[in-house]
């Protein structure tokens, strides 16, 4: 008996109130899940909504047919508690997505660390380049002052007065 047939038969039988509660829970579980009706994941939501196996080993709405659709977990000796060995396809899918997301996060963190290291290296190179540029500017100013002094000296030896009006370096 398929889950869809079970739902239809429950609607038609006398346990309509219990079915209504179970259907509400099923609809709540379906919210946010991308499952197709009739899929294994959809069947698992039904299984969860109806509370799984009862203490008689049956599933509400499926009766003894439940074990042909859902694997029945084994009971621990001396205990009535059941250990759920059934892993929902939805849970499996979510676990795979979580693993993928964690892997992407690790990759992104590694890329971020590499980018931070490159940024620090680039900042150090920029600082060094600025220092070298400033040293070059100072040296050029000193060389220019020396050239002006030589020009003035050379011009005065030949009796040519300099026509420069003031020191052009003062304005820079």
Image (tube, rainbow, N blue to C red):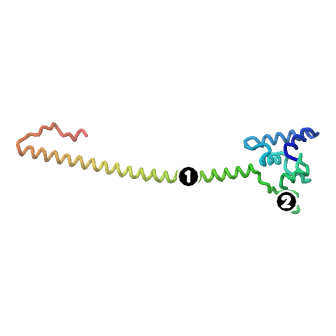
The spot of residue 90 in percent (x, y) is 74, 49
How many numbered callouts? 2
Q: Which residue is rendered at x = 5% and y = 44% of the image?
A: 158
Image quarter (top left, top right, bottom left or bottom right) of the C terminus: top left
The spot of residue 95 in percent (x, y) is 70, 52
Q: Neighbour class for label 2 at 10 Å: few (<14), some, many (≥20)? A: few
Can you say whether 138 is above or below 162 in the image?
Answer: below
The spot of residue 121 in percent (x, y) is 43, 53
Mark seen at residue 109: 1
On screen, residue 44 versus residue 111, left or right, reads right
The spot of residue 42 in percent (x, y) is 79, 45
On screen, residue 134 versus residue 48, left or right, reads left
Can you say whether 119 is above or below 10 in the image?
Answer: below
On screen, residue 84 versus residue 169, left or right, reads right
Secondary structure beneath dot 1 equals: helix
Secondary structure beneath dot 2 equals: loop
Residue farthest along the bottom direction in this orientation:
77
Residue to which mark 2 is pinned: 74
Q: Which residue is rendered at x = 50% and y = 53% of the image?
A: 114
Q: Which residue is rendered at x = 39% and y = 52% of the image?
A: 125
Confirm or deny contact between disc 1 and disc 2 (CB under 8 A).
no
Q: Earlier in the sequence, mark 1 or mark 2?
A: 2
Judging depth in this view, the residue of 28 and 62 nearest the camera is: 62
Q: Quadrant of residue 37?
A: top right
How far apart are the two marked residues, 1 and 2, measured between alpha carbons?
Answer: 43 Å
Q: Neighbour class for label 1 at 10 Å: few (<14), some, many (≥20)? A: few
Residue farthest along the right direction in this orientation:
14
Judging depth in this view, the residue of 168 and 18 nearest the camera is: 18
On screen, residue 83 versus residue 33, left or right, reads right
């Amino acid at each position: 008996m398929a889950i869809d047939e079970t739902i239809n038969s429950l609607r038609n039988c006398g346990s309509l109130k219990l079915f209504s509660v179970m259907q509400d829970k099923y609809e709540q579980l379906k919210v946010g899940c991308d499952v197709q009706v009739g899929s294994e994941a959809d069947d698992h939501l039904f299984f969860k909504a109806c509370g799984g196996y009862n203490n008689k080993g049956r599933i509400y709405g499926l009766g003894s047919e439940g074990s042909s659709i859902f694997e029945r977990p084994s009971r621990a000796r001396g205990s009535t508690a059941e250990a759920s060995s059934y892993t929902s396809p939805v849970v499996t899918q979510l676990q795979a997505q979580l693993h993928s997301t964690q892997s992407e996060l690790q990759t992104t963190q590694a890329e971020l660390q590499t980018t931070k290291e490159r940024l620090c290296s680039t900042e150090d190179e920029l600082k060094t380049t600025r220092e070298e540029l400033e040293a070059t500017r100072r040296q050029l100013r000193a060389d220019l002052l020396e050239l002006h002094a030589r020009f003035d000296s050379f011009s005065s030896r030949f009796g040519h007065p300099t026509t420069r009006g003031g020191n052009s370096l003062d304005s820079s």
